[in-house]
Image (tube, grey):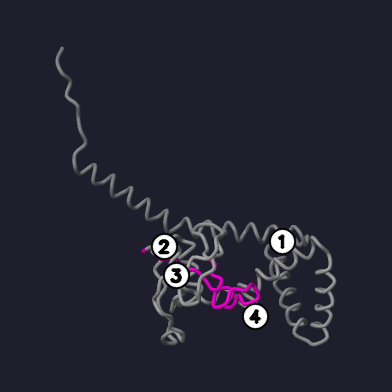
Amino acid sequence: MGHQAVERPGRGEVSSMARLLNYFLKGLVLLAPFAITVYVCVRVFATIDGWLGLPIPGAGFVATVALITLFGFLASSFLTRRMLSALESMLERLPFVRLLYSSTRDLLNAFVGEKRRFDKPVIVTPFFGGQARAIGFVTQETLDSMGMHEHVAVYLPQSYNFAGSLLIFPSSAVQPLDAESADVMAFIVSGGVTMPPPPRRSGPVARQTPSEAPEQIAGP
């Protein structure tokens, strides 16, 4: 039997296929985030419209935003603040409700409230004597009530996750990071895929700390 010749694709065909695949991947990277964003927004609008029973698409979302804004405006008055304080005092007396309410309130205040906690990005050494560095946020600048003087609480978010770890470091082992908190959080959550956070335009950081080996105090 004679050997049948096996036809192999030429370099031009392979190059064309690789180029088409490259175009496809680029289009996927560009369109997928846009499509996912649109899909999530549409689902949120439809869900809120279904809750309120409004036939106009998006009307429920607009009404919800307007209601929340109006409530925030009313909460700025002295009388409303006293009513809210009385309501909070009542909720904090209930065992399970207290845990749920206080946790949700503190979490929202940490991001968008007047007492923000994730606005002090820092660099720490998570392991004693190690060369690795971790990026986190100082959530408590003093722990005197716990008997830990000159120590701070640092929260280390995890990439592609809503979880994180809380570690306690000596104040001297924490190095402030001169960058916007939102950029730092995006850099951490994305696993370092996004661009490194640029320095703030306001100038150098106000507090400088000596570069000494940290004392590992606490775990997650």
Mark 1 vs mark 2, CA separation in Å: 34 Å
Kind of residue sitting beneath label 3:
Pro
First along the sequence among labels 1 and 2: 1
Q: Is residue 166 left or right of residue 95?
A: left
Q: Secondary structure at mark 4?
A: loop
Q: Nearer the viewer, mark 3 or mark 2?
A: 3
Q: Residue furthest left?
A: 2
Kindly identify which residue carries mark 3: 214
Mark 4 vs mark 1, CA separation in Å: 27 Å
Magenta span: 131-155
Kind of residue sitting beneath label 4:
Glu
State the mark number for residue 48. Answer: 1
Task: Tell me the crowding category of disc 4: few under 14, some 14 to 19, or many 20 or more residues within 10 angstroms, Cα based.
Answer: few
First along the sequence among labels 3 and 4: 4
Q: Secondary structure at mark 3?
A: loop
Q: Is residue 54 magenta?
A: no
- Quarter of the image with the N terminus is top left
Kind of residue sitting beneath label 1:
Ile
Mark 3 vs mark 4, CA separation in Å: 31 Å
First along the sequence among labels 3 and 1: 1
State the mark number for residue 192. Answer: 2
Q: Residue drawn 76% across and 62% down?
A: 54
State the mark number for residue 73. Answer: none
Q: Nearer the viewer, mark 1 or mark 2?
A: 2
Kindly identify which residue carries mark 4: 114
- Quarter of the image with the C terminus is bottom right
